[in-house]
Amino acid sequence: QVQLVESGGGLVQPGGSLRLSCAASGFSVSDVAMSWVRQQPGKGLQWISSLGRAGATAYTESVRGRFTISRDNAKNMLYLQLDSLKTEDTAVYYCTRGYGAAATANKRGQGTQVTVSS
């Protein structure tokens, strides 16, 4: 069955970087669009980035230019490179299938916590 396992989160200072990973099983990441969504403390799910089957990418305004989505088809992995992190990026990050904001409604893994704090 479809399974998604996120990892790579942690505690980082403002301006720092992290690389999040999502291990997919039960399907191929090369066959579907994939997205990252996050849930900030006290808030609902927020779509932040998508990667289409043909490689098109999209980002929400607040992370554009700082985050980069990518995948490794051979490893069946999805990644999110987080650079120039801000305190407001503190959230639990999840990977999902689908493209755009609608992806927030799809199955997620357990998530990985990113905390940006000095």
Image: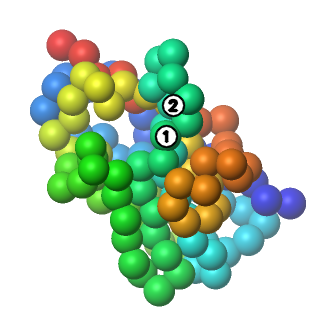
Give the quadrant of residue 98: bottom right
Q: Position of residue 92 (x, y in %)?
A: 50, 30
Location of mark 1 (residue) = 46
- Residue in the image at 19% along x and 23% along y: 13
Callout 1 touching callout 2 (CB < 8 Å): yes
Residue at the far right in the pictured view = 1
Q: Position of residue 91 (x, y in %)?
A: 44, 28
Q: Quadrant where the C terminus lies?
A: top left
Amino acid type of disc 2? Gln
Q: Position of residue 83 (x, y in %)?
A: 21, 45
Other residues around mark 2 within 10 Å, as few (<14) / some (14–19) / many (≥20): some
- Residue in the image at 13% along x and 32% along y: 15
Residue 74 can be seen, yes or no: no
Amino acid type of disc 1? Gln
- Residue in the image at 72% along x and 62% along y: 25
Distance from the alpha carbon under mark 1 to that under mark 2: 6 Å
In the structure shown, which secondary structural element does the residue marked by tag 2 occupy?
Answer: strand
Horizontal relation, residue 79 to residue 12: left or right: right
| Colouring | rainbow
Other residues around mark 1 within 10 Å, as few (<14) / some (14–19) / many (≥20): some
User: 61 and 71: which one is in front?
Assistant: 61
Q: Position of residue 116 (x, y in %)?
A: 28, 23
